[in-house]
Amino acid sequence: MPKAQQTVLEIDLGVLKQNFNYLNSKLNSKTKFLAVVKAFAYGNDATTIAKYLQALGIDYFAVAYAEEGVALRQAGVTVPILVLHTLEVNFDAIVDNQLEPNLYNTKILKAFIAFTSQNAIANYPVHIKFNTGLNRLGFGANDLDALKQVLKNTRSVKVASLFSHLAASEDLEEREFTLQQIQDFKVLTASVSSAIGYTPMLHMSNTSAILNYPETHFDMVRAGIGLYGYGNSKKESQFLKPIARLKTVISQIHTIATGASVGYNRAYKSTAVTRTATLPLGHADGIGRIYGNGKGFVTINGNKAPIIGNVCMDMIMVNVTGIACEEGDEVVVFDAETTSAEALAASANTISYELITSISQRVKRVILNEVI
Ligand SMILES: *Cc1c(COP(=O)(O)O)cnc(C)c1O
């Protein structure tokens, strides 16, 4: 039986490379590849992942917030970095670190132009986002005239790209809606390009659109979840492989009598003599309380052991009745072979994105296959 010492998230860069190559193989050779490394590269390790992808020749990175981009620059990342959610308070950090802001409405566009002109900056690369139906961030058709007017009258910024984000690229039942988003994007971007007199890069596909809507590849794609090994569909998941394995260890085993309870609020009560294992992993590590009380599970020596009672801050207890195991044995929470993060997330009615980005910074990251 494999032994373990503590909770670790193993990150296999060799697998990351395979996923990158697979997604890249879907693209025309001229299409650029942007890797989305927001939220610690989806809970993995943004600087390690970004430096590895940089060595593989990635074209662009995206982060959600400026501070994430600053951390990449400090780690030695030199390729362009798009900040997806620009806030005015971050303008200094953006310019000081050569980050490229997404400007998504007239207010932030004008504020950034004012900032750059005050600092005597010309042709600063910016990205303009269109709202084509997600209704999250972006200029809409009604803003088009104002947008063109502002862009035509400034030399402070240069539009590096025009982009949009799909609302349901993983859901083929929403195909009609998606095709409308694509059509609207083409119309909006053609209008801006002709107004400013040059054609910025266009991009609108996330992982699912890379796979489901080749017509959205345009000049660049933006892949997040696929790089980390999840394809949002059974079909694609077989070609991608999760890069991360979350594993832990049995700290203690108890055999409890019928009617005994386990954990806070006595949420679990045994109906027979029960063997429990206590693991050093709790909601502060990213296994939320939603996984408690029989929903979530771990794998011990090849057997599924359900989480019993409430998830504690630093620990969970699992039912190991009938499972051959002892203190010190390794426990798999999710990995590529046993239980994917997608399957564990499904046990609590959520998605892989939420589970993997929740693994907190307290969990030790161990990098495998770092050599290219
Ligand atoms: C997070 C994000 C992505 C990446 O999406 P995946 O489904 O993880 O590939 C792409 N574009 C934008 C605007 C995002 O916010």
Image: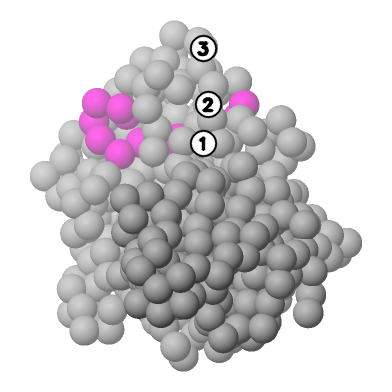
Location of residue 368 in the rendering, given as x and y in whole percent from the top left corner: 80, 63
Query: Earlier along the polypeptide chain: callout 3 or callout 2?
Result: 2
Residue that label 3 marks: 120
Q: Quadrant of residue 301?
A: bottom right
- The colour style of the image is one colour
Front residue of 264/30: it is 264
Q: Which residue sits at x=36%, y=43%?
A: 128
Residue that label 1 marks: 100
Q: Residue furthest top?
A: 118
Residue that label 2 marks: 94
Q: Which residue sits at x=57%, y=60%?
A: 278
In the image, the segment drawn in magenta is 97-109
Q: Which residue sits at x=60%, y=42%?
A: 361
Task: Work out which quarter of the rendered image holds the C terminus and state it.
Answer: bottom right
Residues at circles 1 and 2 in contact by the CB criterion of under 8 Å: yes
Location of residue 327 in the rendering, given as x and y in whole percent from the top left corner: 71, 66
